[in-house]
Image (cartoon, grey):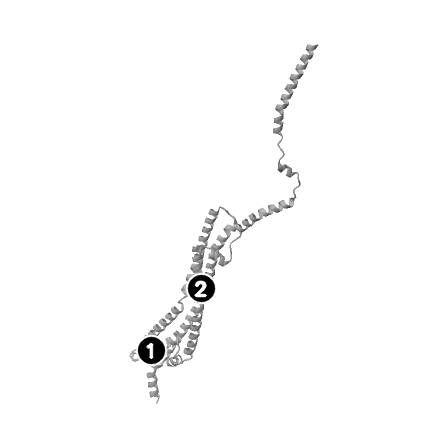
């Protein structure tokens, strides 16, 4: 019995030693599997108000939104702002077109005054020529006046005076031809003088749209280059350059349309002025022919009068 009890006691001792060893080895493993409680976890246990967090988020995001908004704000799209932001080539085109527009309005003012004065003088002279019964009377009425019509009367009187000796040996056909030649040259010179300056209007009206189109094409090319460099298709980036380019075409049309209209108005006015000069020339030729008939028929009239006596 004593031996059996001793064996049992030994077995219990061995089992207790094994259990103690197992517990000792398992304790570090359990300690590693359970994470330690950190101060952050302790703070999460306390409730955090939501409103201050939202304020912090807005405070952080507000500057970023403002910077993005400033970056996407459009340029100054007024005509002056677009001109100042344009490329130097587009600026040169705009300045040239603005100068062409200034030339157009200057020619309009100057030529309108010139045409109005010339038409008034020609019509007054025409009335005086029509009312006169002889070339000498017409010369007296228009003495001291200026203008092509008065010059026609003076030229005809001078030619009649220069051909005085030839009328006794020949007919008056040569005199009429010479007077008609003088009057035609005076009329042509007056018309040429009146059309001076209108060619500039025709040039501006025909070339200004194409010059503006050149500025537009150049500006759009620069806009596409800017798009490729910025690697963005944002309208706020693309629109200012395109608007600056289109401004050149707009200025070209502003310069061309008035030039064409004013040129057509002047063409009609000059045509009317030429008709007045043609009427004056025809009236002078009638006076010369009348005086010539009186002079050539004077000997026959004297003979008839002498025979009647």
Relative image position of residue 185 (x, y in whole percent): 35, 71
Q: How many marks?
A: 2
Decide if residue 237 is on the left or right side of residue 186.
right
Residue at image point 34% right, 81% down: 295
Name the one closer to the observer, 167 or 231.
231
Q: Quadrant of the C terminus?
A: bottom left
Relative image position of residue 26 (x, y in whole percent): 62, 24
Relative image position of residue 249 (x, y in whole percent): 47, 57
> For mark 2, does the 10 Å Cα neighbourhood hold few (<14), some (14 to 19), or many (20 or more) residues?
few
Q: Is residue 195 above or below residue 129?
A: above
Task: Residue 54: give its label.
Answer: none
Q: Nearer the viewer, mark 1 or mark 2?
A: 2
- Would you say residue 269 is visible in this rendering? no
Q: Which residue is mark 2?
A: 102
- Would you say residue 200 is visible in this rendering? yes
Relative image position of residue 117 (x, y in whole percent): 43, 73
Query: How far apart are the alpha carbons under marks 1 and 2?
Result: 45 Å
Decide if residue 291 is on the left or right side of residue 258.
left
Q: What element does badge 2 sit on?
A: helix
> Tag 2 or tag 1, which sits nearer the N-term?
2
Q: What element does badge 1 sit on?
A: helix
Name the one closer to the observer, 47 or 284.
47
Name the one closer to the observer, 167 or 180.
180
Decide if residue 295 is on the left or right side of residue 81.
left
Q: Which residue is mark 1?
A: 158
> For mark 1, does the 10 Å Cα neighbourhood hold few (<14), some (14 to 19), or many (20 or more) residues?
few
Residue 293 figure quarter:
bottom left
Q: Are marks 1 and 2 in contact (CB under 8 Å)?
A: no
Q: Residue furthest right?
A: 1
Residue at image point 62% right, 45% down: 54
């Amino acid at each position: 019995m004593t031996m059996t009890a001793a064996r049992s006691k030994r077995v219990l001792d061995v089992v207790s030693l094994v259990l103690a060893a197992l517990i000792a080895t398992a304790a570090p493993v359990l300690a590693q599997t359970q994470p330690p409680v950190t101060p952050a976890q302790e703070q999460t246990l306390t409730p955090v108000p939501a409103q201050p967090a939202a304020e912090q988020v807005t405070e952080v995001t507000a500057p970023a939104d403002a910077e993005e908004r400033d970056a996407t704000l459009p340029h100054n799209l007024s005509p002056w702002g677009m001109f100042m932001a344009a490329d130097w080539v587009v600026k040169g085109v705009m300045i040239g077109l603005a100068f062409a527009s200034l030339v157009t309005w200057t020619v309009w003012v100057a030529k309108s005054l010139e045409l109005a004065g010339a038409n008034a003088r020609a019509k007054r002279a025409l009335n005086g020529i029509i009312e006169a019964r002889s070339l000498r009377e017409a010369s007296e009425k228009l003495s001291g006046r200026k203008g092509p019509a008065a010059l026609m009367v003076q030229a005809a009187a001078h030619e009649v005076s220069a051909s005085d000796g030839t009328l006794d040996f020949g007919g008056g056909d040569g005199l009429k031809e010479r007077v008609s030649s003088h009057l035609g040259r005076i009329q042509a010179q007056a018309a040429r003088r009146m059309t001076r300056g209108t060619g500039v209007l025709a040039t501006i009206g025909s070339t200004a749209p194409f010059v503006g189109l050149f500025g537009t094409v150049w500006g759009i090319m620069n806009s596409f280059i800017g798009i490729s460099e910025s690697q963005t298709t944002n309208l706020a980036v693309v629109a200012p350059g395109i608007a600056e380019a289109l401004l050149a075409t707009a200025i070209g049309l502003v310069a061309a349309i008035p030039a064409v209209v004013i040129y057509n108005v002047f063409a009609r006015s000059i045509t009317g002025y030429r008709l007045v000069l043609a009427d004056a020339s025809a009236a002078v030729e009638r006076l010369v022919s009348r005086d010539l008939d009186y002079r050539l028929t004077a000997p026959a009239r004297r003979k008839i009068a002498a025979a009647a006596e």
